[in-house]
Every structure is written in structure tokens, then in C-alpha cells.
Amino acid sequence: MFDLLLTNGLVVTPSGAERLDIGIAGGKIVSLRASGVGSPDEARRVVDLKGQLVVPGGVDPHVHTNSVLPTAAESGIMCFGPDRVSEGAIYGGTTTLVDFAHWKPGDELSESFARKSAEWAGSTYTDYALHGTFKEPEIPFEVLEQVPDAVANGHGSYKVWMTNTTPTRPKQKTDLGNMWGLMEQTAAAGAMLAVHAEDDDIVMYSYKKLQHQGKTDLEYMHHAHNNLSEKLSFQRAITLAHHVGAPIYLMHVSAREGVDAIREARGRGQAVYGEILPHYAYFTAEDYKQENGAIYHTYPSLKSETDRDSMWESLLDGSLSTLATDGVCTDLEVKTRGKTILDATGGHAGVEMRMAVAYTEGVKKRGLALTRFVDITSANAARILGLYPQKGVIAIGGDADLAVLDTNVDRRITASDLHEADYTPWEGYRVAAWPSMTVLRGTVMVKDRNLLTGPGGSLLKQRVSSDVLNRPAC
């Protein structure tokens, strides 16, 4: 007998979309069979989905929780924690989030992961994994040498910054030599290195130039975090990875030049993966001129219509792999406290909207195949970060993480519809799909926009496949 049986759903598996019944027991998918064929299965609970779309629960590979906002470091203001962010995620059809465990001088790597995991344990509505993260110019050799043990313990991804981002915030850049050393360790241990790639020299000179010209209003942000910076930094990161023989994951691609660099590297067979954010594929630098224009901002920056349009083109053709959020959830007062290029708060509330925006912009407006929709919202992130096939696929033996989407809606979104903040940059946005049910490891977490149970998420172990490590596999 199944614990849960979902019937009459349009279910997206790797082979396509078809009417299937999904049998779930012990938190796993144990049966997939054509709807209406054979004798009815027995289950403790049966839910008739009435033709709604069923996809794997979303995997957002890039969120921040309980972090001091860098442009508010003097005040100690923090973004929201795992409870608030994961609540928004589970309402929005996302069942796995990946946050950042920051190494601090004096830490063992294991201590960094344990400290961050303790913040999530018992408070999260989603499952979660952690990128090991470095924000120091130098990483001690004894810490680099701990990477293989951390990977063996299930921590399969790491992150560095190539820029300090603004002249006013705490330093976070890791120099290229130490990035090289870390890359050697992650490559040898079978892990993924994620990179925030901007050219620090170009960015910092651009800030000085803009200040000299008196152009510090928010509308000039894209002149500081510009296309040249993305081009040079992506080329350097990709070249270094090629030299080492390491896979890399380039976060929040924002410019056509970044797309071109990734496409070229993948064309050579290099294991390079690119991530975009929904707002880079929808808004432009012109939106900085709106009232409260800061709500559209995260770093690097919004850019031109040409850059924006390249985002969806690249998701459609497979050059870019994932749609993440860089979620930094705060309320509006905090998000808009900075008014200039020097003090704007990066990141924004977008975790809950990610799946609906991806369907609306990709499937509804651009004809994105449903299998490709799954790739960009769950499967590819799970593959790249070593969570597949436990996550990111509807298949027998996988976790029963499911998002049920009502695709017969035409709804304008307001902040009151959402749960992760008191504002949304998607205010008034018209969605063509809206989550009606979310299942985490066989437990119905949300149904008909009602949260049915408390936090129950777990820390995941990452094991990146050799296929993903050695070629552009997704």
C-alpha cells in the first residue's frame, strides 16, 4: 500500500510529459503508471490532480540566509533566516535550497559547515545543501588540504568571489593564486567550484570614475558592474579552470559577454556551467530609474535589453544551465535603505516566484519544452551540485519531491500573495502558472496555498558525477 497516491497528473519525467499516477512510500517514488490503466492502486491517501502539471520540486542553487548585508555591515542588519526563506520556497514549489557556509579564519572546514547547518536544522521547510565559501584573499594551505575530507563527508561545492563588489563593503575577494589552489583541490576531490566572477580592477576603477563624475545615483550601477568586467573575469576563470582541468559553475551571468564566454568554452568540451537569475532575464538597467529601483538590484547589475534577451536565448539553446535567485530576503525598508551605487543592497526576494516566472517566461511565452523547464528549475542544479537523481527528477527510487502547478491561471501577483518578504519586485506580474501543491519526500507540505505541516527539511550530501565533472553534461 502506498502512503500517498497522486492520480491524473500531467507528469514530466526525463522522457517527456504524460498522464501518470505517482505512488509514494517511505518518502520515495515507488510507482509510475499510466493513469486509468489496470486496477486502482491502494493508498492511505489519494489526491486527484485533475490534469495539473507535475514537475520535480524546484532546486534553487543560490540563496543566502542569516547573512549580514555587506552594504549594512556597520549596522549588523541581516537578511532573513532559513525559516522565512524556506517557507517562501515551499509555497513556490521549490523543495531544495543551497546556502553558503562561510569559512572564517581559525575555522576547520568542518566547523564552518556545522555552524551553518545548525542554523537550518529544525527550522527549514525544504531540504538543503551548503556551498563551502571563502571570503579571504588567502586560504591557508592547511585549510585547502581539508577540502578532500569535506567532499568525502558530502560537501561537494565551494565558492569564491573575484571582486570586493563595492569600495565600501567588507573585503571578500580571493586572489587568483589562491583561487588556483582551491581549484586544484576541488578538481582532485571531485567537487564543483562556484565563482562570483567580476574583474575587481575594472569594477573599482569604474566606481572611482563615477564618483569623480558625480554619477553615484542608482541608475549608474551598470556602469560600475559593466560588461567589460564580466567578459574579462569570465575569460580568466575559464582559462584557469582549463589549465587545472577543473569544472566551474559561474553564478548570476548578467551580460551577453558572459554568455558568449561560456558558450565558447562548452563548445571546446570544457565543463563550464552558467547560472542566471529571473530578474536578469526580465528587467533591465532602465528599471533602476523607477521609484524604489533598488528592489530590482543584485550584484553584478541589471544591464541592457540586448543582455537581457541573451539570457532566455541561452536557456533555450542549452548554453546556460540553471535558473537560480541569489535570494537575499529582507523587507522593503531594508532593501531600499541604500540609494546609490555605493550603498545599494544586493539580492532580493524572489525564491517563491521562481517556478511561476520560469513557466510564464519560458514555456508560455517562448515555447520552452517541459523537459527543459525541469532542467533549468531543478534537474541541472541537482546534477551540477551532486544531488541527482535523489533530487531533480521524477523517477522510481528518487525522493518524492514534487511541485504541482495549475497552468490554467491568469493571475496578477501582489506582495500579499507571497511569504518571504513584505514586497516583491514582481508586483503586478502576470503569471501563467501557480503552485497548487508541494510535496517534500512524500509529505504534502502545501495544498491550495495552505501550509499543512511544520519544518521538516534535512541536510543533503552531495556527490558530483564524473560526467558532470569532465564535460558540459547539462
Image (tube, grey):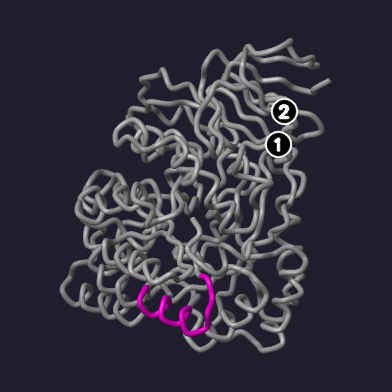
- Residue 417 showing in the rendered view: yes
Q: Nearer the viewer, residue 205 or 92?
A: 92
Name which residue type carries label 1: Ile
Tell me where residue 178 appears, x and y as whole percent: 54, 86
Residue 245 part of the magenta segment: yes
Residue at the spot of label 2: 31
Residues under labels 1 and 2: Cα distance? 6 Å
State the residue lying farthest toward the left: 213
Q: Is residue 462 above or below residue 243?
A: above
**10 Å crowding of disc 2: few (<14), some (14-19), many (20+):** some
Q: Quadrant of residue 204?
A: bottom left
Residue under the image location 40 percent in, 28 percent down:
414
Residue under the image location 69 percent in, 82 percent down:
143
Name which residue type carries label 2: Ser
342 with respect to 92 (left or right): left
Magenta region: which residues? 234-247
